[in-house]
Image: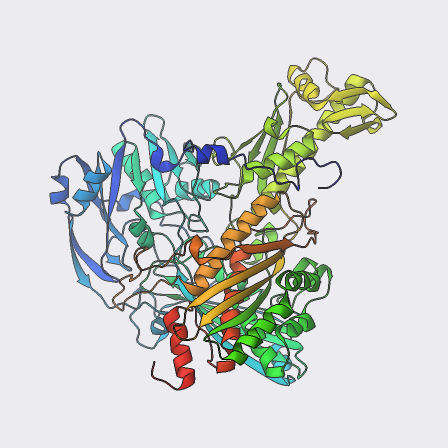
Amino acid sequence: MAAGQKYVGGGVPRKEDPQLLTGQATFVENLTVPGMVHAALVRSPYGAARIKKVDLSAALAAPDVVAAFSGEDLADEWAAGLPMAWPVTDDIRIPDHWPVAKDVVRYVGDAVAVVVATSRAAAADAAELVDVDYEELPTVVDIEGAMAPGAPRVHESFENNECYTWTHSTGDIDAAFAKADVVVKGEYTQPRLIPNAMEPRAVLVQPSPAAGDFTMWSTTQIPHIAKILLSMILGISESKMRVIAPDVGGGFGSKLNVYAEEALCIALARRLGLPVKWVAGRSEGYLATIHGRDQLQEIELAATSEGKILGYRVKIRANMGAYLQLVAPGVPLLGGFLYCGSYGGEAYHFECTGVFTNTTPTDAYRGAGRPEATYAIERAIELLARKVGLDSIEIRKLNYLPQGEMVPSPGGLEFDSTNYAPNLDRALELLGHDAVRAEQAERRAQGSTKVLGLGFSTFVEMCGLAPSQVLASLNYGAGGWDAATVRMLPTGKAEVVTGTSPHGQGHVTCWSQIAADALGLDIDDIEVLHGDTHVAPHGMNTYGSRSLSVGGIAVYEACGRVVEKAKTIAAHLLEVSPEDLAFENGSFSVKGVPDRTKAIQELAYAAWTAHSLPEGTEPGLEANCVWDPPNFTYPFGSHLCVVEVDTETGDVDILRYVAVDDCGTVINPVIVEGQVHGGVAQGIAAALYEEATYAEDGTLETSSMINYLVPSAAEFPSFELDRTLTPSTSNPLGVKGIGEAGTIASTPAVINAVADALAHLDVGEVPIPATPERVWRLIQNAKGGAA
């Protein structure tokens, strides 16, 4: 902990936890308002079909039903379709996307009607009575099938299923490959993943018909963005909309969206003049909440015979699903600058094609483009190491970017701070690398059927999603800033109003730590307000590991402005110049006369009474800050995984997992470790367990946790964590992001470990997820046996 800091850097217990652990948190499903009715949606069972007729008569006659509507019935409710905020190219194809389909359904789960009843059960029962006459159409569910000549078109108005192609280049890529001694190529599949936040999505909308106002409680990561976009969809003045994100039980990007059900509940509340609530069931959420990943990747590295990388050539195809959700086209671009990882080179070329299929739309899922990029480069670096005969450690250290600040990357970015080799060395030390290799060799020599593998993943990621001018150059539809207000109250306490919207990250605790140190207050005297657009009117919310490096810095800067104003008031009351005052531990003192002091609490009361203020000073002691960073932040780290593979069954058991991250200045180490734990677990899940699959007719085969394998704590070892400290140069606290780092690094670490365990068998590429059956088949094929 730095000098003068009482809270920042310490493992302060989370202020959020007592309310959560004692069942006193406020989740949307817990909310009830007088006169509330419940909505249930009728969803398409077909991957593609024309809607010929929707018969609502039986549903309308059912007990306790208030209303029922088809997509055509609701067509005049929409001033615009559901939004897509990232048109990555000028010629991108953007299909209409209505909250309830009017003529054609394009994936299993597409809504075709809604029933409203006085209870959730009555609405669900009546929804089953809606009779929809469909004309089934051909479907296409995978990228290669969708791009094949003559493939069924997901949108008949487009000539094919290509959504866009975006390219990015630096240097002379052809020259780099022409002079290379060695070229290696990797082809990888990123399977589709289904987010599993602890709390399913839910919406409650309460109208005030006389005033024309609407209050929406939603399980959203983006209340401020949702307020603006929903006003546009429904043609409602933004001043008439209030969006509240209460306690939100996780998101991982799945709640970084403006969903059909939110717009629909507002439309129903407006039409019926009643509060309307919708809560997703878990299986319904699997159909109607975005999915993640789903990419085909090709990566080529051009290098010298010594293993020095000269150039990177990357081509990916990304499944958009049936429609474009909020930032879906831009998700691959978030990794598009990072397929060179933490390594140097002379040239870089990246190409991404977005593809429509008859599947649930995809969008940002924890890491959003960066796990995919890290996977590709960390698998390819292993190919290069084998090609030139170098150890995995040597090839990485040979190609690391140099230590420094504002270091240019082949991908065209400038990394704020780099120091990669010491980070990897610390991970190797923590692991005991030589001992692991010795045991691996011993088991192989003994002919053991349980072989060891050691996998590496060294990564760098970009966090913060800012500055706004850079986002403009990428055609992103919003800014990268965030806002905070810090208000000293007359009683000597402080309120921090933040534009970020936490859903498990610990913002209340961390913002309290920052403010308590900056203002010299006790941490319990800080109240953090968030998630309500009437209380916190400005914000860009929470996603992309941006909250601390953008929203947290806004809090820090606002605190500094409060202290500066307090200093002028203290100088006036003490009858000295502001330059004669020192501020420490919440108190201003006259330099050289330590007994002449004014505590900031006294000054807050004096500012409230306004009895004696400097001329031109407004009453009150508060300040605002809108922080727009000058650059992204670039956390990095080294993750090492030791696995045991049973060559008789294909089972993979993770024995050890070591992670050494560098996220700059740490506000709360306990929260950092919790974020890494959760991220690593999700990355391991992608490596070994989770994969969403579709049947050819568009049916989601992994439609529940029965057949979509979400691992439990029993599947993980105790994670061994440490950190190095390389402060960011992009903000005054030196902080970086950490929420997605574990997910970004862990999948390639695990698969590299499995590949290393089987390297002596020459099994070829290890697919993800590396399920026991797949691993067993690899082994059998390598042995020449039937698989």
Counting from the top left corner in percent of width and height, residue 521 is at: 66, 28
Image position of 404 with respect to 379: above or below: above
Q: Along the line of sight, which residue is nearer the eye, 767 or 554?
A: 767
Residue at far front of view:
446
Q: Residue at x 68, y 70 (%)?
A: 397
Q: Along the line of sight, which residue is nearer the eye, 698 or 232?
A: 698
201 left or right of 572 in image: left
Counting from the top left corner in percent of width and height, residue 417 is at: 70, 57
In which quarter of the view is residue 609 placed?
Answer: top right
Image position of 520 with respect to 116: above or below: above
25 left or right of 737 in image: left
Image colouring? rainbow
499 left or right of 360 in image: right
Q: Along the line of sight, which residue is nearer the eye, 361 or 709?
A: 709
Residue 87 seen by the camera? no
Counting from the top left corner in percent of width and height, residue 424 is at: 66, 63
In which quarter of the view is residue 709 placed?
Answer: bottom left
Give the position of the N terminus as an image quadrant: top right
Residue 501 seen by the camera? yes
Image position of 733 with respect to 242: above or below: below
Q: Along the line of sight, which residue is nearer the eye, 551 or 325?
A: 551
Counting from the top left corner in percent of width and height, residue 64 is at: 16, 34
Residue at far right of view:
592
